[in-house]
Amino acid sequence: MIFLWGNGLVTIVILALIIGYVLVKGLPAMSLEFIFTSPKGVTQSGGIFPTIIASIYVTGLSILIGAPVAVGAAIYLSEYTKEGRITQIIRFGADALAGVPSIVLGLFGLSLFVYILGLGWSMLSGALTLILMILPIIMRTTEDALQAVPNAWRQGSVGLGATKWQTIRKVVLPAATPRIMTGIVLGVGRVFGETAAVMFTAGLAINIPFLPNEPGRTMTSHLYLLATEGTSMRTAYGTALLLMGIILIFNLGARRLFGGSKVRR
Amino acid sequence: MASENKFEIKDLDFYYSDFEALEAITVNIRKNTITAFIGPSGCGKSTFLRTLNRMNDLIEGAKVEGSVTLDGTDIYTADTDVVDLRRRVGMIFQQPNPFPLSIYENVAYGPRIHGIKNKAKLDEIVERSLTNAALWKEVKDKLNQPGTDLSGGQQQRLCISRVLAVNPEVLLMDEPCSAIDPTSTQKIEDLMDQLKENFTIVIVTHNMQQAARVSEYTAFFLAEDTNKPAHLIEYDLTDVIFTNPSDKRTENYITGRFG
C-alpha cells in the first residue's frame, strides 16, 4: 500500500523536478521581447515569435483538416459498417499507423509531400504529416465515444421515423461530443510538441508563415537546433519553458470549455 | 371489404440469419382495439411485434418471408417508405429511453425530424402530446428540465408522448410496464384505455393479469423448444382465451403450468 503510494509520489516528484528545472533555467530568458520579436543575427538573441506562430499554425492546420477526417472515418466505421473483416483490417491499420515512429513519418512526409507532391518545406507539408500521426488517435477516441452512446437512444430515434443520419446528427453525435473533444485535445497536445515529423517537412526557415505553402520553424525544431548547437542554452530553455507553458494553458482552457468528460456519465 | 383490420399478417416466417424464430404466423390485428401478445420468455413475441414497424431491419441478418400489410398495403416491398411507416406505427420500449434532452425537446424531437419548425406549432404539439399521455400537469412547469430527471413511470409516459407527437396510427408496446412501479403501471393502463379510441394498440406482456385487464384480443405464442421456431398457438377474444381456451397448451400457460 505504502509502496503504491510511494510510486505515485515518485511520479509527482519527477514531474516537479522537470518543470522546476526548466523553470529555473528558462525564466531568465523570459521577457515580452522574447515572446513577441524575431531572432536577431547569428547569436540568436532577440525573440522566438516566428516559431510560436509556426507551431500554432502547423498544429491548427493539421487539426483543422485532420480532425473532421478522423471523426468522419470513425462515424462511418462505427455507425454504418457492420463488424467484419474490413472493419477489423481498417482498425488494425489505424493502430499500426499509431505505432510508427514519428521520425519515420517525418521521412515519409519529406519524400511524399515535400518532394514527390512538390509542396516543398511548408506548413502544409508539416500539417499533412502530422495528420498521419493524429488520425489514429482521434479515430480511436471518437469510436469509443460513439460506442458509449446507449443503443436505446438510437432505437428510440429510429422508432420515431428518423433516418440513420438524422439519428447520428441529432442524438448520437451531441451525446458523444464531450469525449470526442477530449480526443481532439489529446491530438492537439501530441502535435504541438512534435519535433521529428515537422522538422523534415515544415522546414527550418525562420519565417512568420501566412499562407500554407510557406515554411516555418516550430518551437520544437528551434529547441532542437539550439540545444544541438549548444551556444544559446538560455534561449533553448526559454523556448522549452514557453512550449510547456502554452501546452499547459491550452489544456486548462480545454478542460474549462469541455468539462471533465470522464466524470460525466 | 371495409376492413376492420389494421394489420393482416399471412404466413410470416422470420429468421435471424439461419435461425428461424417465427414460423407461419397468420393473424389480423383489428383497428382501434388493444391486442395483447402473451407467451413464455423467448417465444418471439417481441420479435413479431418489431416486424410490424420493421424495427428488425436494424438487426444484422434479419429476414422476413410472408406478408405483412398495413391498411391493405404490404410493408415489406422495395419501395415502402420505412421512415413514414415508423412514424405511423410507433413503438414504446421496455426500458424507458428518453433522450438526453429537455422534456420539451424530447417530445419535439419527432415533429422536428418530420420538418416542423414553427415554434408556436411545436409548443402546441408538445402540450397536446403530453396531455394525451397524462403527463402535462406534472411537467408543465419544468419543460426545460432533462427528461432523465423524471421517475421511471413518468419517463415511460414521456416516451409515449414522444410517440404521440408524430401522429401515429398504431402504438406498439413492448412490455412497457415491466420496469415500472405498480402505481405508474396503473396510470399507463388507464392511459391505454383512453388511447385505444384513436389508436390501434398492440402490447407484448409477460403479465397475464395485465393482458386480461387491458386487452380485447389476445394472441398466445409458444416455441416448443429453444431451438425451434415459435408459432401462434391461439388468437381470440381475451375473454375467451382466459376463460375457455381451445388449445391445451394455452390452457396450461394461462393456469401457470409453465411460465
Image: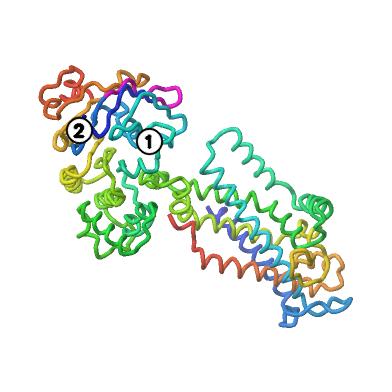
Q: What residue is disc 1 on?
A: B54
Residue at x 49% of width, y 61% of height = A260
Q: Chain of mark 2?
A: B
Residue sticking out furthest to the right: A42
Secondary structure, mark 1, is loop
Q: Badge 2: how crowded within 10 Å, few (<14), some, or many (20+)?
A: few
Residue at x 65% of width, y 70% of height = A246
Question: Is A216 one of the magenta-colored residues?
Answer: no
Secondary structure, mark 2, is loop
Closer to the camera in the image, B106 or B138: B106
Q: Earlier in the sequence, mark 2 or mark 1?
A: 2
Residue B39 in sight from this viewpoint: yes
**Picture quadrant where residue B30 is located:** top left
Residue at x 50% of width, y 48% of height = A146
Quadrant showing the C terminus of chain A: bottom left
Residue A28 in sight from this viewpoint: no
What span is in magenta? B15-26
Q: Is residue B257 left or right of residue A180?
A: left
Q: How many marks?
A: 2
Disc 1 residue type (three-letter): Arg
Q: Is residue A99 left or right of residue A175?
A: right
Q: Chain of mark 1?
A: B
**Picture quadrant where residue A121 is located:** bottom right
Q: Residue A19 location, x and y as percent? A: 67, 68
Disc 2 residue type (three-letter): Glu
Q: Badge 1: how crowded within 10 Å, few (<14), some, or many (20+)?
A: many
**Picture quadrant where residue B26 is located:** top left
Closer to the camera in the image, B197 or B179: B197
